[in-house]
Image: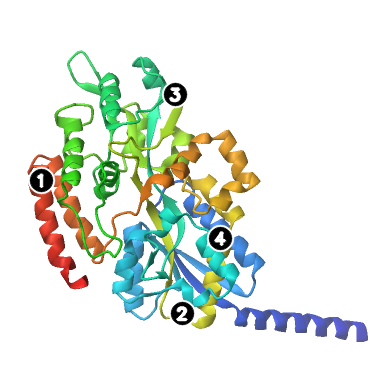
Amino acid sequence: MLKSFFLKAVAATALSFSTWASAQAVDLQFYFPVAVGGKAADTIQGLTDEYVAKNPDVTIDAVYAGSYQDTVAKAITASRGGNPPQLSVILAVDMFTLIDEDLIIPFDDYLSTDEDRKWVDGFYPAFMENSQTGGKTYGIPFQRSTPVLYWNKEAFKAAGLDPEVAPATWDEMVEFGKKLTMKDASGNVTQWGVRIPSSGFPYWLFQGLAIENGAILANAEGNKTNFDDPKVVEALDYMVDLSTEYEIMAPGIIEWGATPKAFFEGQTAMMWTTTGNLTNVRENAPFEFGVAMLPEKVQRGAPTGGGNFYLFKGASDEQAKAAVKFVQWITAPEQSAKWTIATGYVAPRPETWETDTMKAYAADFPQALVARDQLEFAKAELSTYQNQRITGIFNDALDAAITGKKDAATALKEAQAKADEILAEYR
């Protein structure tokens, strides 16, 4: 009888403690853009579950919010409605928009130790270019990327090209593209030389051409664009000429989402797309493929891309601290390695590449190193205040030139004038 009473008392105490611990847990809501390709959803859920299992004092509600555009819209709407998430992965280029809307707080407020500051300094500088402003860190790089060039080695071999060598310059891309563009007996193209998508967010891949020609589309303060720089005009002329003069790329707007499939099906021998498609290509290409840095004109170069973690206003001090600890954990080497291998995104810290996990991955799949090595030449993705309006204006200019409605110089001059009008108040 006494033993039974004692066991019941212990069980009741344990249940009471469990209930108390649950009640004391810090609740976090985490918005994540699931529409980013690869195994992102399963991997992020697995990592989140692993963290919560190791940290029972925290609960994390991972809300899969759709595309990047959907995610930032939902985060802004929720914040305006008084119910913001504590944490979200949103495009790095949306940093100025989130600051302008007064929705986020810098991580610096919760990084007090030397170890914390060492952690911030441990990210690749190229990724921090559009994660910091005004001496503060607003974004922590997570699913970051650069565009790279993929090529079909079998198509290269069939065209008499060395299947192990990608074009290193603009001129070589044209030269290779002419040999790779195939037509049937009726003169219809069955395989294009190259495919550079120009739908959705065409500014991103085009920015690679601009950087390679020595141009920067916007300043670091996010309040001035250089759309009508002659170097930008020359880059856009080259992109248009790939279709109209050199005839190695399909004319008109080329769909972003359809590009990997076109590559798999042999409709194009080369494609420009994100390194975030790397795992997708590895698993679905029915041929041997290569990955290379984007070809240069006056220099190597590519824009960075992808999403950062942001801390939202409205969180309690406990929630913000818990959110920072979660971000520090998920960007640590072993977790970051899992994420990179599952998706193809670039591990944003050099130390991740030093783990045994990543060394083994890179030895087995050296294509994964290309985007990392390209960071040496990378520049911040186009990001300004009123970013969606500014990139919309620029995208419209690219569209007008690509579809032949306007020449490149006219389209870009008009875009610059519109951007100046919007950004003047931020200077």
Tell which circle, 4 or 1, labels the residue nearer the N-terminal end: 4
Residue at 41 percent of width and 69 percent of height: 138
Residue at 7 percent of width and 47 percent of height: 410
Q: Residues within 10 Å of mark 2 (few under 14, many from 20)?
A: some
Q: Position of residue 400 (x, y in %)?
A: 12, 46
Residue at 32 percent of width and 37 percent of height: 259
Residue identifier under label 1:
409
At label 4, the amino acid type is: Ile
The image quarter containing residue 274 is top left
The image quarter containing residue 92 is bottom left
Label 4 and label 3: CA atoms lie apart by 36 Å
Q: Residues within 10 Å of mark 4 (few under 14, many from 20)?
A: many
Tell which circle, 1 or 2, labels the residue nearer the N-terminal end: 2
At label 2, the amino acid type is: Ala
Q: Is residue 32 visible?
A: no
Tell which circle, 4 or 3, labels the residue nearer the N-terminal end: 3
Residue identifier under label 4:
330
Residue identifier under label 2:
315
CB within 8 Å, label 4 to label 1: no
Q: Is residue 79 left or right of residue 290?
A: left
